[in-house]
Image: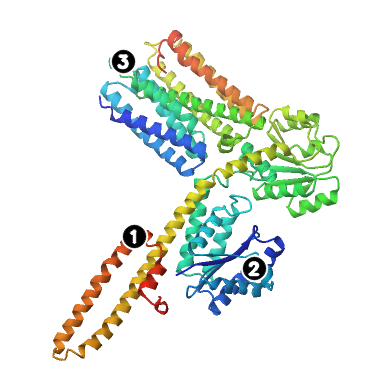
């Protein structure tokens, strides 16, 4: 297997991380822009790494845990880049890149499973999985943004206005970025889940409708919808909404780990 | 090609002198015209701000005597006694003048280290002088370099990013919570000098709506009129605190004006929208326990002073980086200046050698009458070729080798060596 693209991806992500950290510590705009460019290059190399891996093992990227993690990392990077460009704010890159790197490295450094090619499941199934992973990536991003919000808010309330506070995005922008990310997640998970049901409906003879994953996914959807409502219009706006966002992501992690491994029949890796 | 600078600033002159020597745009244009007409300067640029008045110029013929002439001109132009002015004026020549301007553009020479306004003022002074034909190739290059220095210092260092006054620190902190203030509203309690400073900062940052509340309604109306705000009745807290995002209080009171229960009620009415309170009064205008309320941020003037102090240290730590950028651009400008000077010197040498060759041939040919016209022409051609060969290589090297230009520090010495004073280009 050719390691060129995985190596290029990790180098680009690492360099991007270093540049984002430097941007956060020095405020040099050129460094920040270079960080974004490197992240873009990392995304391209990561895409080819995913493609190569899928072709090499004659399977889809999400057929095993490592592929799912790598795809998750790629979608996280993609969502973050979109959010950074939309809100013109790159100070949080230094906090997001470690997550992307961890998922990428965990996926690509571990030995690959020897898997038999999966049964052909069609476009609807592929969209169901990709949209679900995109939703989880967007929720992960909103989790990171909420943590930054809580940290910055704490510093501002305690009058500890050091270097980092001057360079982080304003609180309201962080809240908006988190809400944008959750909106991407909500739309993706709603569409992904709907497509999942369509796919199951077509194959109802082979698969059971009763899977605890459905319940927890609906709970996640409801919780994020609640966050979206509370964060925008009620007395929960601010730190309380951010805490809810952090809590919601804990449920997502629970869905990914305990539910997938011990309860779900058909959702092992996503 | 030399540069001269004569000026005064906040360090060398008290405000009474500075205000007498400041230039309006029209005066700057007239001064440039008069300096050219009197033959004192060929190129002129006047930089006049509230903290400095400086005249940059290129004299027609280099002489250190140009600066006293400029000082006398300034004294006459502004009708200030020469002895009063002379103690405040500084004179810089060539690389010192270049370095001074680049430091000014970088904000390193400002009263408030790293302040941003000076770059705009330099840009405006250059634009004005350029539009009126007062600048030439040297000052154009010099001021374009200065603008580049200012821009680089602002993007590559943090010299100008942190607020340095209590008022600006408070406004910048509000931006840490709300982002840009274009769609925000502010309420100012009190109409004294401190309030005015904050209002001015808020207006500069584009606050959308300003409300003023003061015990004396007349004073409130006066301040509101000046800053296009609205007056709110004294003590009408429930309505006054409903819409603003920022509240600035600077009132002389014995008991806190904004008690916790008032703010609690206001926050409930606002649906807990964030509220930033700047308490600049002594004794405190806002009850300390109000800071515990959800989404309420309270900063007292002591907190803001501490932040200003931290920022001052942070700005000072950026000086070496900014100085490095200045040095880099001074070297770049001097290299360009040397290349222009040296190429001019080589051209002058060529002219002089041709003249020498002509008189030499005239004198020698008298004793070589046996040569035919063709042979004489051949000898002249050979001498021309030799002169060109002697000068061509150094001229090309000077054009092409930056390092060589850097090594030749003193073009004047070369001129003195090869050309007599009157023959200087």
For disc 1, the neighbor class at 10 Å (few under 14, some 14 to 19, many from 20) is some
Q: Separation of disc 2 and disc 3 at Cα?
A: 85 Å
| Residue A172 sits in quarter | top right
Quarter occupied by the C terminus of chain A:
top left
Check disc 3 and report its element: helix, strand or loop: loop
Q: Where residue A255 sits: x, y (%)?
A: 48, 15
Residue A259 versus residue B247: which sits nearer the camera? B247
Residue B158 versus residue B39: which sits nearer the camera? B39
User: Taking B165 as reference, is B42 above or below it?
Assistant: below
Cβ atoms at labels 2 and 1 below 8 Å apart: no
Q: Is residue A107 left or right of residue B23?
A: left
Asked if residue A194 shows in the view, the reply is: yes
| Residue A57 sits in quarter | top left
Quarter occupied by the N terminus of chain A:
top left
Residue B208 versus residue B373: which sits nearer the camera? B373
Asked if residue B174 shows in the view, the reply is: no
Q: Which residue is mark 1?
A: B404
| Residue B9 sits in quarter | bottom right
Check disc 2 and report its element: helix, strand or loop: helix
User: Taking B141 as reference, is B421 above or below it?
Assistant: below
Callouts 1 and 3 in the same chain = no
Query: What residue occupies the far top of the structure in this picture?
Result: A262
Q: Separation of disc 2 and disc 1 at Cα?
A: 40 Å
Q: Which residue is mark 2?
A: B86
Q: Chain of mark 1?
A: B
In the drawing, what numbered circle is on residue A113?
A: 3
């Amino acid at each position: 297997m050719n390691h060129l693209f995985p190596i290029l991806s990790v180098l680009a992500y690492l360099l991007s991380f270093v540049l984002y950290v430097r941007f956060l510590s020095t405020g040099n705009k050129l460094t920040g822009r270079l960080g974004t460019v490197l992240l873009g290059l990392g995304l391209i190399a990561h895409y080819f790494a995913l493609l190569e891996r899928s072709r090499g093992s004659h399977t889809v990227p999400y057929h095993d845990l490592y592929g799912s993690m790598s795809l998750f990392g790629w979608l996280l990077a993609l969502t973050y880049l979109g959010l950074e460009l939309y809100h013109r704010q790159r100070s949080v890159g230094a906090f997001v890149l470690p997550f992307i790197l961890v998922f990428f490295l965990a996926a690509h450094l571990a030995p690959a499973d020897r898997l038999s090619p999966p049964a052909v499941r069609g476009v609807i199934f592929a969209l169901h999985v990709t949209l679900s992973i995109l939703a989880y990536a967007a929720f992960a991003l909103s989790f990171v943004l909420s943590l930054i919000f809580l940290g910055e808010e704490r510093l501002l309330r305690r009058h500890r206005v050091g270097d980092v506070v001057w360079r982080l995005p304003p609180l309201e922008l962080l809240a908006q970025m988190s809400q944008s990310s959750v909106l991407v997640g909500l739309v993706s998970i709603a569409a992904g889940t709907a497509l999942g049901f369509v796919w199951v409906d077509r194959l109802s003879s082979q698969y059971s409708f009763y899977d605890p994953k459905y319940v927890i996914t609906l709970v996640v959807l409801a919780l994020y919808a609640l966050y979206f409502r509370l964060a925008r219009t009620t007395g929960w706006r601010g730190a309380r909404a951010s805490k809810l966002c952090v809590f919601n992501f804990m449920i997502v992690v629970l869905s990914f780990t305990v539910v997938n491994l011990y309860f779900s029949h058909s959702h092992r890796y996503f | 090609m030399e540069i001269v600078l004569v000026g005064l600033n906040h360090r060398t002159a008290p405000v009474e002198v500075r205000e007498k020597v400041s230039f309006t745009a029209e005066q700057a244009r007239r001064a440039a015209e008069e300096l050219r007409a009197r033959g004192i300067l060929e190129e002129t640029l006047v930089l006049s701000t509230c903290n400095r008045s400086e005249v940059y110029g290129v004299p027609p013929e280099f002489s250190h005597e140009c600066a006293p002439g400029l000082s006398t001109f300034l004294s006459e132009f502004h009708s200030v006694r020469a002895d009063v002015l002379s103690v405040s004026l500084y004179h810089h020549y060539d690389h010192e003048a270049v370095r001074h301007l680049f430091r000014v553009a970088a904000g390193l020479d400002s009263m408030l280290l790293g302040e941003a306004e000076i770059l705009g003022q330099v840009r405006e002074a250059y634009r004005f002088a350029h539009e009126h034909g007062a600048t030439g190739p040297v000052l154009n290059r010099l001021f374009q370099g200065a603008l580049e220095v200012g821009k680089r210092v602002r993007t590559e260092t943090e010299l100008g990013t942190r607020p340095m006054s209590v008022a600006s620190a408070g406004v910048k902190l509000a931006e840490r919570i709300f982002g840009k203030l274009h769609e925000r509203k502010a309420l100012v309690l009190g109409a004294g000098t401190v309030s005015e400073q904050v209002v001015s900062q808020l207006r500069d940052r584009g606050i959308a709506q300003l409300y003023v509340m003061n015990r004396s309604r007349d004073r409130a109306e006066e301040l509101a009129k000046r800053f296009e705000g609205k007056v709110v009745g004294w003590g009408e807290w429930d309505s006054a605190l409903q819409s603003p995002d920022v509240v600035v209080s600077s009132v002389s009171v014995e008991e806190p004006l904004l008690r916790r229960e008032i703010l609690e009620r206001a926050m409930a009415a606002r649906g807990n929208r964030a509220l930033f309170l700047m308490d600049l009064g002594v004794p405190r205008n806002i009850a300390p326990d109000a800071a515990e309320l959800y989404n309420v941020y309270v900063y007292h003037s002591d907190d803001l002073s501490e932040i200003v102090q931290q920022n001052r240290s942070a700005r000072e730590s950026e000086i070496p980086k900014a100085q490095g950028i200045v040095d880099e651009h001074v070297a770049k400008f001097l290299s360009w200046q040397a290349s222009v000077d040296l190429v001019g010197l080589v051209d002058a040498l060529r002219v002089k050698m041709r003249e020498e060759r002509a008189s030499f041939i005239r004198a020698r040919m008298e004793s070589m009458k046996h040569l035919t016209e063709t042979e004489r022409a051949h000898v002249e051609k050979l001498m021309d070729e030799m002169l060109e060969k002697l000068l061509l290589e150094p001229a090309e090297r000077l054009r092409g080798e930056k390092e060589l230009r850097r090594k030749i520090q003193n073009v004047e010495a070369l001129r003195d060596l090869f050309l007599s004073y009157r023959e200087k280009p």
